Image (spheres, rainbow, N blue to C red):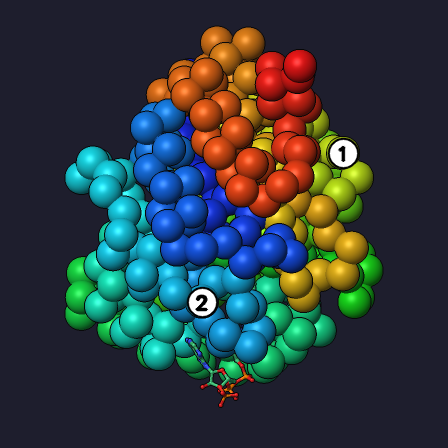
Amino acid sequence: TLPSRVQIVEVGPRDGLQNEAAIMPVAVRARLIELLSRAGLNRIEAGSFVSEKAVPQMVATADVLQTIHVPKDVRLAALIPNVRGFAAARAAGVGEVAIFAAATESFSLHNLGCGVDESFRRFSEVTIAAKDAGLPMRGYVSCALGCPYEGAVDLERVVDVAQRLFALGCYEVSLGDTIGVGTPMAARSLIQRMTQSIPVARIAVHFHDTYGQALANIFACLEMGVAVIDSSIAGLGGCPFAPGAAGNVATEDVVYMLDGCGVETGVDLNKLLDATRFICGNLGRPPESKVARARLAG
Ligand code: HMG
Ligand code: MG
């Protein structure tokens, strides 16, 4: 059986746009978030506060946050690597922050400029500040099903990093198949192993679709009781530090699948396609979403 209701965490304005060649203006980023919220998405990652040199696409996330008009029940999150990012995110008025760790040393070094232990030292400083400010904190584990530098990843390392994120006070941890190499049985084993020590309600999944497995992997996780799914409008994006990685699973495709399975999401597919049209028009490229291609054709 599947969960009766699933929360979708829309990461397109961050994970999507961070990897597009074209840097979108603040007004476009803000309008995209408004259209996503109008479609019924109420958890949206709006951007990140990271080094401008590392990810130029995410510069001016503060301006984006200050431009947006969305209802109060829409929670806007930002990705932050350290206390400096936290301070900027807080000043910009985010409703949530997300810290991001990796299951492998090599990916951590490429993505964060430091190893896993040092990243946790930085995150522990963020934790203190976040608690102080009363802001909820989400965590990510990258390379949960494979690493672009180390290949196969031992599940125990993934679980260990997730547990460290919970120990810091994350209310939810999102397991990232950063390079989209996972297949359904691997996804199932991961959730099985995670839920030996962590309640399934606190686990989210974050699939990139490099090998076209994301929807199948999500279905396998739904069957295990996972009810929080990260996805990106139009299937945009990837990670600049994961060579060859494609975009996240497309939000339109996830919503179509869940609608068809009778699982509630609160998202209106037709309104979602307004956001697809808008962002793809601005990027000057077609959507990766199969559903969007089918619906917007002609
Ligand atoms: P570093 O080089 O190790 O450290 O970078 P640093 O302290 O020497 O800082 C480098 C530069 O960044 C300095 O500027 C700092 O001032 C600046 P410079 O002196 O060279 O002009 N800096 C900052 N600027 C803005 N905001 C900050 C900040 N902190 C330092 N908060 C650092 C360390 C973490 C900064 C860098 O490696 C970085 O920004 N990395 C960002 C990585 C990133 O955004 N990756 C993509 C998101 S993760 C992802 O996509 C995976 C996920 O989707 C899940 C999945 O799919 O698996 C979440
Ligand atoms: Mg990602």
Residues at circles 1 and 2 in contact by the CB criterion of under 8 Å: no
Asked which secondary structure carries label 2, the reply is: loop
Within-10-Å neighbours for mark 1: few <14, some 14–19, many 20+:
some
Q: How many angstroms separate mark 1 from mark 2 (CA)?
A: 30 Å
Q: Which residue is mark 1?
A: 212
Asked which secondary structure carries label 1, the reply is: loop
The C terminus, quarter of image: top right
Which image quarter: residue 126?
A: bottom left
Q: Which residue is drawn at the image coordinates 51% and 38% (left, top)?
A: 279
Residue 212 falls left or right of residue 144:
right
Label annotation for residue 37 = none
Question: Which amino acid, mark 1?
Answer: Gly
Q: What percent of the width, then of the height, locates residue 127?
A: 31, 70
Question: Which amino acid, mark 2?
Answer: Val
Q: Which residue is drawn at the image coordinates 62% and 48% (left, top)?
A: 237
Does residue 193 sit above or below 120 in this rendering? above
Does residue 220 sit above or below 297 in this rendering? below
Q: What percent of the width, then of the height, locates residue 232?
A: 54, 39
Q: What percent of the width, then of the height, locates residue 281?
A: 56, 36
Q: Which residue is drawn at the image coordinates 56% and 77% (left, top)?
A: 53
Q: What percent of the width, then of the height, locates residue 43?
A: 35, 40
Residue at mark 1: C-beta within 8 A of ligand 2: no
Does residue 109 sit above or below 69 in this rendering? below
Q: Which residue is mark 2?
A: 59
Which image quarter: residue 22?
A: bottom right
Within-10-Å neighbours for mark 2: few <14, some 14–19, many 20+:
many
Residue 216 falls left or right of residue 83:
right
Q: Is residue 98 visible?
A: no
Q: Is residue 73 visible?
A: yes
